Image (cartoon, helix red, strand yellow):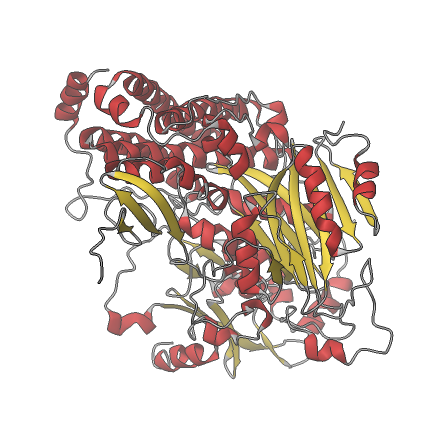
């Protein structure tokens, strides 16, 4: 392809520059962007906190429960948290519109709360984390799941042990 | 009585920040007129102390930290690190994971080589072709971004396998993209062999003879262009390279043009390797789906980054953090070769010769 | 099928009169990785000369200061276990060749490549000791040894150009042997002070 052919092709196709912000920008689905945290599916295992290379994730025990904070400034968008999370509680969206004014930089936090609850069996205060029952055999029905979820960790273990397995 | 002697040589500083240099390296060059007579290299402008930081992070965090040593060789670092950790712990990566590692590596190699040769053309002065080559590279970069989520730090590796997977849609997308790149690369090779400006400025410039190359211990395309046919993928195979159609390209002239040609030919080989991988991709898991503790031990592993041989030495003890991680990147070995290449070169060629070793300063100085 | 010559161990033992310990393993791809510990650091030069004759290429030089394995707690700082290790029981363990293994001695690994197989020669140097430079034999040892000298307080004798490599002359030497607080190193990013500020800023927004 000689230069004239390239020239003619480029004239026909137009400039390769993206039209953003006057048009959409090429954003692939798998882009590693902003972190999103879903407290309902979090198991409370804190693996994401341990594998984050930038120490951008922080769990803290408060009177209301366990808070989750991820500051996007320290975050390097590596995806380790999403990869090692056993459920889909923390994952990266493909949202890259994170530009902000310097005064707002401490606002760029993804915050979540795993609330406290009272165990229906023993009355203790425990976190309402998603139970770690992925590998239970046979898999839990939805009633069993909500029963397990409403208990504290000790009562959860007891419930699972005593679970009557249908023949 | 002081004699007013005119010094024989004049010392010019090139760098650390220079419009024609792609990496911040301080060259103190003594010139006689337009010809270089002596080169002194002063490094240290991007030293970040990563070797110290690796001892403060656990092994799983280190996979990400090693990736950020360099962005163009960014897949080779975590891959070699993970290989060392797997060697110590005796972990076997599943078959699919091995092939996907090769896929990630070769994709990075294609984009890295296109970048370097495009910069060479830019330094020759042929700006239009530089833009054209960067546009070809954009096909590759879009492909990398769509598969991995980031254009440079692809985050594909983990200890025990790979973190991503391919399905039919993405495989078809990759095949389409590499077909386009292949057509363009063949055209680029033809241009390199025939275009007057490129040939006049790069042939016979920055020659590194075979004997000098052995003395300096250079690696990668620099060594292969001087007649040393050494490629880690063939000499010390890892991942799936012993089952794939690998071709090692070399040349004998050792000048800037030969190095660019070796890199361009390697792009075509990478495309063939990608096609073979996608064809032979086995099923099964992509990683071991576990986070084992790495027992105490030590290991030495090597792999072929786009710039040459990367060697990692990993030593672990009982803690989750490694005791010592040391790596030597290919550019670290190649800087010394510049002393021979820049001998008797013209001042105008300095930038081009420095670019032809494909310098990666962030790798060198960690 | 290894590319290392069959009589390698014999030749290396002959070149190093003080004694060697040699081990090698081959992986599933047929790549052999061999380790050679030297009893005396002075044997380094004859061994290197032999390897140069055999056509080996020097790949990397690693210097490390291995710490003694701790029994109870898991430190994060392995590189400076000096004070703790000095209070060890009377019987200081010794590495091969008699150098005290107490967290202050150095272990210097010379990684060679012989046509694809790796051979690592390990020299043990006590604190305050020195090691002969390999630059006259292997030109590419130059930068490695300069870097080694600025990171640790090892003296490399007969080096043709013992300048600092990456660190400025105003920085005190032996960097990896000193305890630098992590928060100083990362300029207070991702440390306790930062989180307190972040969480305080978010108080109303939860």
Residue in the foreground of this view, choosing between B236 and B292? B236
Quadrant holding the N terminus of chain B:
bottom left
Residue in the foreground of this view, choosing between C37 and C145? C145
* Residue A145 placement: quadrant: bottom right
Q: Is residue A98 visible?
A: yes
Numbered marks: total: 0
Residue B312 on image: x %, y %: 60, 47
Q: In this rendering, is residue B117 above or below A31?
A: above
Residue B138 on image: x %, y %: 30, 35
Residue at image x 44%, y 49%? B70
**For residue A52, side relative to residue C78 (left or right):** left
Q: Residue furthest front?
A: B1
Residue at image x 59%, y 65%? C152
Residue in the foreground of this view, choosing between B79 and C15? C15
Residue at image x 41%, y 79%? C199
Residue in the foreground of this view, choosing between C128 and A6? C128
Q: Is residue A133 visible?
A: no
**For residue B12, side relative to residue A70 (left or right):** left
Residue A144 on image: x %, y %: 65, 60
Residue A25 on image: x %, y %: 24, 44
Q: In this rendering, is residue B66 above or below B33?
A: below
**For residue B286, side relative to residue A64 (left or right):** right
Q: In this rendering, is residue A137 above or below A111?
A: above
């Amino acid at each position: 392809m000689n230069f004239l052919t390239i020239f003619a092709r480029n004239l026909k196709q137009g400039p390769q520059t993206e039209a953003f912000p006057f048009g959409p920008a090429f954003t692939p689905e798998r882009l590693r962007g902003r972190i999103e945290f879903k407290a309902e599916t979090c198991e409370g295992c804190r693996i994401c906190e341990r594998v984050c290379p930038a120490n951008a994730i922080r769990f803290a025990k408060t009177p209301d429960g366990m808070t989750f904070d991820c500051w996007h400034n320290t975050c390097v968008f590596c995806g380790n948290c999403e990869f090692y999370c056993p459920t889909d509680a923390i994952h990266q969206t493909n949202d890259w519109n994170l530009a902000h004014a310097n005064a707002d930089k401490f606002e760029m936090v993804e915050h979540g709360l795993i609330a406290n609850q009272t165990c229906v069996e023993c009355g203790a205060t425990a976190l309402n984390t998603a139970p770690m029952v992925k590998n239970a055999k046979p898999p839990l029905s939805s009633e069993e799941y909500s029963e397990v979820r409403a208990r504290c960790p000790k009562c959860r273990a007891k419930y699972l042990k005593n679970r009557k397995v249908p023949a | 009585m002081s004699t007013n002697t005119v010094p024989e040589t004049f010392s010019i500083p090139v760098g650390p920040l220079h419009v024609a240099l792609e990496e911040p390296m301080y060259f103190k060059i003594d010139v006689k007129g337009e010809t270089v007579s002596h080169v002194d290299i002063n490094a240290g402008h991007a030293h970040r102390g990563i070797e110290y930081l690796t001892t403060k992070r656990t092994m799983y965090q280190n996979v990400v930290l090693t990736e950020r040593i360099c962005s163009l060789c960014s897949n080779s670092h975590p891959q070699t690190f993970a290989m060392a950790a797997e060697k110590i712990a005796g972990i076997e990566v599943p078959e699919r994971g091995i092939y996907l590692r090769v896929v990630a590596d070769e994709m990075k190699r294609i984009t890295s080589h296109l970048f370097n040769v495009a910069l060479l053309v830019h330094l020759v002065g042929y700006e239009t072709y530089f833009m054209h080559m960067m546009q070809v590279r954009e096909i590759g970069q879009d492909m990398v971004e769509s598969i991995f989520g980031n254009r440079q730090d692809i985050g594909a590796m983990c200890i025990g396998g790979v973190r991503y997977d391919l399905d039919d849609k993405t495989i078809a997308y990759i095949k389409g993209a590499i077909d386009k790149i292949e057509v363009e690369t063949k055209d680029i090779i033809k241009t390199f062999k025939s275009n007057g400006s490129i040939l006049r400025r790069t042939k016979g410039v920055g020659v590194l003879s075979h004997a000098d190359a052995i003395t300096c211990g250079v690696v990668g395309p620099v060594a292969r262009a001087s007649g040393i046919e050494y490629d880690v993928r063939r000499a010390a195979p890892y991942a799936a390279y012993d089952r794939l159609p690998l071709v090692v390209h070399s040349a004998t002239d050792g000048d800037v043009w030969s190095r660019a040609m070796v890199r361009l030919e390697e792009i075509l080989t990478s495309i063939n390797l990608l096609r073979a991988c996608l064809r032979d991709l086995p099923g099964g898991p992509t990683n071991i789906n576990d986070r084992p503790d790495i027992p105490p031990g030590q290991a030495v592993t090597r792999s072929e980054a786009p710039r040459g041989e990367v060697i990692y030495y990993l030593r672990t003890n009982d803690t989750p953090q490694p005791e010592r991680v040391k790596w030597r990147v290919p550019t670290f070995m190649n800087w010394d070769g510049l002393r021979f290449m820049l001998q008797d070169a013209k001042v105008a060629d300095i930038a081009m010769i420095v670019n032809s070793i494909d310098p990666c300063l962030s790798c060198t100085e960690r | 099928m290894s590319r290392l010559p069959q009589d390698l161990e014999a030749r290396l033992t002959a070149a190093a009169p003080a004694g060697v310990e040699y081990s090698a393993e081959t992986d599933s791809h047929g790549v052999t990785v061999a380790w050679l510990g030297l009893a005396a650091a002075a044997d380094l030069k004859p061994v290197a000369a032999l390897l140069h004759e055999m056509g080996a290429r020097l790949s990397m030089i690693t210097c490390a200061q291995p710490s003694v394995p701790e029994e109870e707690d898991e430190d994060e700082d392995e590189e400076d276990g000096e004070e703790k290790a000095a209070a060890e029981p009377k019987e200081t363990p010794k590495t091969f060749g008699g150098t005290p293994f107490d967290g202050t001695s150095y272990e210097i690994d010379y990684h060679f490549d012989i046509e694809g197989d790796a051979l690592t020669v390990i020299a043990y140097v006590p604190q305050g000791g020195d090691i002969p430079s390999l630059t006259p034999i292997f030109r590419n040892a130059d930068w490695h040894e300069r870097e080694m000298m600025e990171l640790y307080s090892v003296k490399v004798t007969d080096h043709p150009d013992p300048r600092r490599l990456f660190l400025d002359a105003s920085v005190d030497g032996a960097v990896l042997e000193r305890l630098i607080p992590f928060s100083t190193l990362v300029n207070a990013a991702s440390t306790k002070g930062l989180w307190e500020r972040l969480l305080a800023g978010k108080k109303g927004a939860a």
